[in-house]
Image: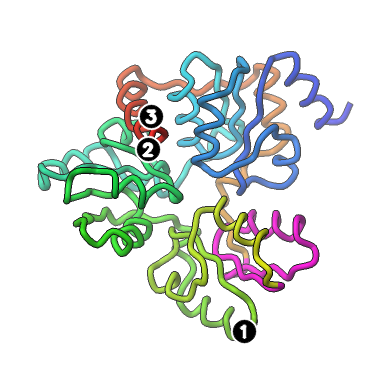
Amino acid sequence: MDVKEHIKKLKAERNAVILAHYYQSLEVQDVADQVGDSYALAKMAQSARQEVIVLCGVRFMAESAKILNPDKTVYLPASAAGCPMADMIEPDDVIKLREQYPDAAVVCYVNSSAAVKAVSDICCTSSSAERIVRSLPQRQVIFVPDQNLGSYVAKLVPDKEIILFPGYCPTHHRIAAADAETARNEHPNAKILAHPECREEVLEYADYIGSTAGILEQACNSKEKELIIGTEMGIVEILQRKLPDKRIYSLKSALICPNMKKTKLEHIERCLEGKADPVELTAEEMEGARLSLERMVSV
C-alpha cells in the first residue's frame, strides 16, 4: 500500500480530517480534505466534527485549530514548521505598546503565537483586516505584527491612527519594487496580483491586492491571459494547474516559504498512526487567544 492509500485508510480509522494551506506542496494538498488560506482553515477547524484534525501548515495555524475546537486532537505534521513573522513578536511587546497607547485597541494578525493573541483584543486575517479595523470603536489601533499589512490597512482606513509593529513576512518582504518593475517590463500585458504582506512600494504596482484566497478567485475569474502573482510559489503552482490556458508568472523567482514546504506525506502518516505529539497549549493561552479568534470569526 502506498503512502497516499495508507493515509486514506488511517484517516477513516482515526475519524480524522486533513486541512492544508494553499502554500503546502501539491502532493500534500492532494491528500487533504479541504484546502484554504489561514482564515478559511480557522473556520474549517472550528466546525470540524471529526475527532482528529491534521493541520498541514505552520504552528500558529495548528494552535488556532486547537483553540477554536479544544476537544479535538490537533496535529501539526511538521512540528518544526514555525512562522518567522510570528516569532518576531512576544506578549511583552504587546503589553509595552498597550502601556504606551492605553486608549488603543490591539489588532493581532492571525500569523502570531497563541500567547500574543491572548494579550490582544481581536485577531484578523489579510482578507478581514480592513473590516476588523473599521469595526472597532477606538480611533487608535495597535496593529501587530505585520507592518506591511498594517500600512496597507492604514491607507484604506484613514480615519484611524494605526500604530505599527516592525514585523514582516520574510518571503513577501523579499519582493522589491525593482522586481515588480522588471516583471511589468518583461510581461507588459500581464496584470499583477499581490498579497498585502508585500512592501508598500511593491503594492503600488499591483492591479489587484488581496489574500491568497482572493488572489486565487481573482485569477480564476479574470479574462486576462497573463497574470503575475505576488505571493508564495504555492499559489503559482495551483494556478498553473487550474488554468492551463493562461500564462502564470511569479513576481519574483523562487518565492518559497521554507516552513510551509516542510510537511511531507510521511509526516501526515505518522500523525495518523499516533506516533506524533499533538498540539498542546496552556489554559491561559487557550482562553485569551480563543476570545481574540472568536471575535475575528464573528466579524
Front one among 253 and 155: 155
User: 53 or 222, which is in the foreground?
Assistant: 222
**Among the two numbered marks 1 and 3 on one chain, the one whose residue lies closer to the N terminus:** 1
Q: What numbered label is drawn on residue 299?
A: 2
Helix, strand or loop at mark 1:
loop
Q: Residue at x 38, y 69 (%)?
A: 200
**Magenta-highlighted residues:** 225-253
Question: What residue type is disc 2 on?
Answer: Val
Q: Which mark is residue 294?
A: 3
Q: Which is in the foreground here, disc 2 or disc 3? A: 2
Amino acid under label 3? Glu
**Callouts 1 and 3 close, C-beta under 8 Å:** no
User: In which image quadrant can residue 295 be found?
Assistant: top left
Magenta-span inclusion, residue 121: no
- Location of residue 171 in the rendering, given as x and y in whole percent from the top left corner: 50, 58
Spatial CA distance of label 1 from label 2 is 39 Å
Find disc 1 in the rendering and name its residue.
188
What type is the residue that disc 1 sits on?
Answer: Pro
Image: 201 above or below 260: below
